[in-house]
Amino acid sequence: MPVTSKDNQWVKEWRGLCADAKKRRESGLFAIEGARLCGDALASDVPVRAVLYTATARQTYAGVVESLISAADQEIEITPELARQMGDTTNPQGVFCIAKTLDNLQSLDKIDIMGYYGALEDMQDPGNLGTVIRTAEALGLSGLLLSEGCCDIYNPKVLRASMGGVFRLPLVQCGDMAQTVAVLQEKGMTAFACVVDKDATPITAVTMPRGSIAVIGNEGNGLRAGTVAACAQQVTIPMAGRAESLNASMAAGLVLWEMTRPRG
């Protein structure tokens, strides 16, 4: 018999993990929705504790759901009505997982000092963070540095916007960004502060060498003054229109593209 009640322990656990970052941190678990994202997690060797699915989803996404059932500690069939109540999307696919967080967060001493890195200071919008992770993975960055003020990487909106990039891209939770930049520059890397300032160097006029870090700030306030001061150079995106600034994830995409694009 499929589960019908939202008070089922696994349904309650899934919903709690969706809503509560503290619960995710303390339990070491997080919630995933959707056949594609659940399948990406499994393909990235994310340990699956439980899979919840509807009978229709088991038929429609047979390969993914059967693989999840084989890998999970628990399997729970739920009704379509319960899936609609659980879903955070307009048309839930009826596939949900509870998974264990990956031990993929690197420390500063594992940084490739000849690599290309993005660094995000206090990025708080989960959609923006997920989009930057997806972009960084697509462009082949060595990883992303995340300050202590960034939102939780296992937030459901981060997972969805990253299209599974959270599972694959090396991430470093680095605490204070100004201190991190100072440490890495002592190791020979070069940090570029991305600012909205007409006196900064246009990003199109800069060639970022290997061992570069593009440091991007908060959606509303940009980079902290101490972080800007710690960087070797200030760069900006030239804009011809009347807008004062770009969306944080869009700005990050342009900067990271300029950092990694092939040059003849």
Image (spheres, grey):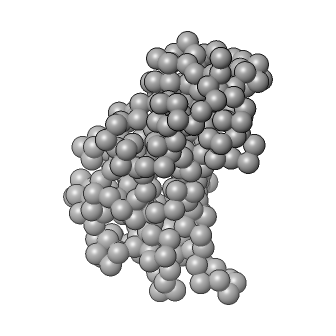
Locate residue 24 relative to residue 251 in the image: left or right. Answer: left
Q: Position of residue 47 (x, y in %)?
A: 44, 24
Q: Is residue 127 above or below residue 196?
A: above
Q: Residue at x 56, y 50 (%)?
A: 157
Residue 26 sits above or below residue 97 on the image: below
Q: Position of residue 195 (x, y in %)?
A: 46, 76
**In the rendered picture of this protein, how many numbered marks are placed on residues?**
0
Residue 2: image quadrant is top right
Q: 193 above or below 89?
A: below
Q: Residue at x 51, y 62 (%)?
A: 125
Q: Is residue 28 visible?
A: yes
**246 up-or-down from 149: above or below:** below
Seen in the image, is 231 located left or right of residue 219? Answer: left
Front position in the image: 26 or 253: 26
Q: Residue at x 73, y 48 (%)?
A: 90
Which residue is at the front of the view, 165 or 156? 156
Quadrant for the C terminus, please.
Answer: bottom right
> Foreground residue, 67 or 81?
81
Q: Is residue 36 in view? A: no
Residue farthest top in this picture: 70
Residue 41 placement (x, y as % from top left): 54, 30
Image quadrant assignment for residue 164 = top right
**The N terminus - image quarter:** top right
Residue 136: % across, % down: 53, 49
The residue drawn where x is 63% and y is 47% is 88
